[in-house]
Image: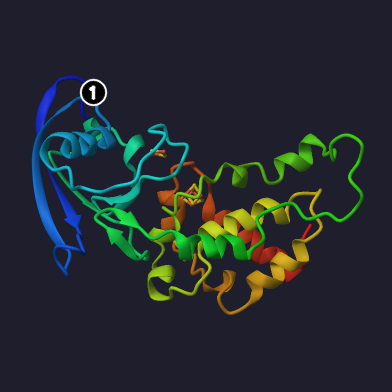
Amino acid sequence: MAGNSGKRQVRIRVKRFQPDQKAEAFWQDFDLEVEGSDRLLDALNKIKWTLDGTLTFRRSCAHGVCGSDAMRVNGRNRLACKLMMADLGARITIEPMLGFPVVRDLVVDMDPFLAKYEKIKPYLINDEPAPRTERLQSPEDRDRYDETTKCILCGACTGSCPSVWANAEWVGPAAIVNAHRFIFDSRDHAAAERLGILSDRNGVWRCRTIFNCSEACPRGIHVTDAIEEVKRAIVYGGE
Ligand code: SF4
Ligand code: F3S
Ligand code: FES
């Protein structure tokens, strides 16, 4: 890891797509000075604010919470706001995530991704009358799905999965992570319904245990393990 202080020059190569100007995507290099404490998002903002205002990318929280700035950096999906420039070399290549339709520059269309998320019913289903206070759960039962509550729907896992690249219809890892979050929640009563949805030909079985998803997740979720737990629940029964 490089030091995190001091100015230095970097060249950032960006894959751009400006459909109102040019039908094909093209590469553009930007040379700029960055601080050791800058994150990649700071560098992109610097490009936009001082070199080329047409550069288009999503961002909001700048703190790894909103999930809006996932992009492919030197071949790996990362959140630009969590990536220190000090940890990158002097030549950086940025592309939109693979497996998503590109809208403009680094902005991808999240609608198909969110449609798959909705497909697994990402909300508590329990038709019993609501108790006077909250629906109670033991700490052990809460722990059962704690990790998958941490998903911020950034899409980094889904956009790094070769099975998704090969088949746009496949539900993909992010939707399965969010199904996991409810399937193993003791207060929820729709595990069988979700497992049925994930048993079909575009469900969990298209996962080939490639692990790119786990490596890409900025929240440290063991995505492949969560998918394996859902596969086991389909075969041996949910909890
Ligand atoms: Fe992003 Fe991780 Fe959620 Fe996938 S599981 S959408 S990589 S936060
Ligand atoms: Fe894809 Fe992850 Fe499975 S990379 S094939 S979802 S383990
Ligand atoms: Fe919100 Fe990066 S800007 S996660």
Q: How does the figure colour the protein chain or chains?
A: rainbow
Q: Position of residue 119 (x, y in %)?
A: 61, 66
**Which residue in the protein does label 1 denote?**
4
Q: Quadrant of residue 213?
A: bottom left
Label 1 C-beta lies within 8 Å of the nearest ligand 3 atom: no
**Which residue corresponds to the image point at 18% horizontal and 48% vertical from the top-left?**
54
Please indicate, yes or no, whether residue 176 appears anywhere in the rendered image. yes
Query: Eyeballing the image, is 72 above or below 194?
Result: above
Residue 162 is left or right of residue 133, and the answer is left
State the residue in front, 140 or 60.
60
**Which residue corresponds to the image point at 47% horizontal and 52% vertical from the top-left?**
214
Residue at far bottom of view: 201
Residue at far front of view: 20
Instruction: Give the structural element (helix, strand or loop) at label 1.
Output: loop
Please indicate, yes or no, whether residue 237 appears anywhere in the rendered image. no
Q: How many numbered discs, if any?
A: 1
Q: Position of residue 162 (x, y in %)?
A: 39, 68
Picture quadrant of ligand 3: top left
Q: Amino acid type of disc 1? A: Asn
Residue 214 is left or right of residue 17, and the answer is right
State the residue in front, 123 or 222.
123
Q: Quadrant of residue 43?
A: top left
Residue 91 is left or right of residue 215, and the answer is left
**Which residue corresponds to the image point at 78% horizontal and 61% vertical from the top-left?**
190
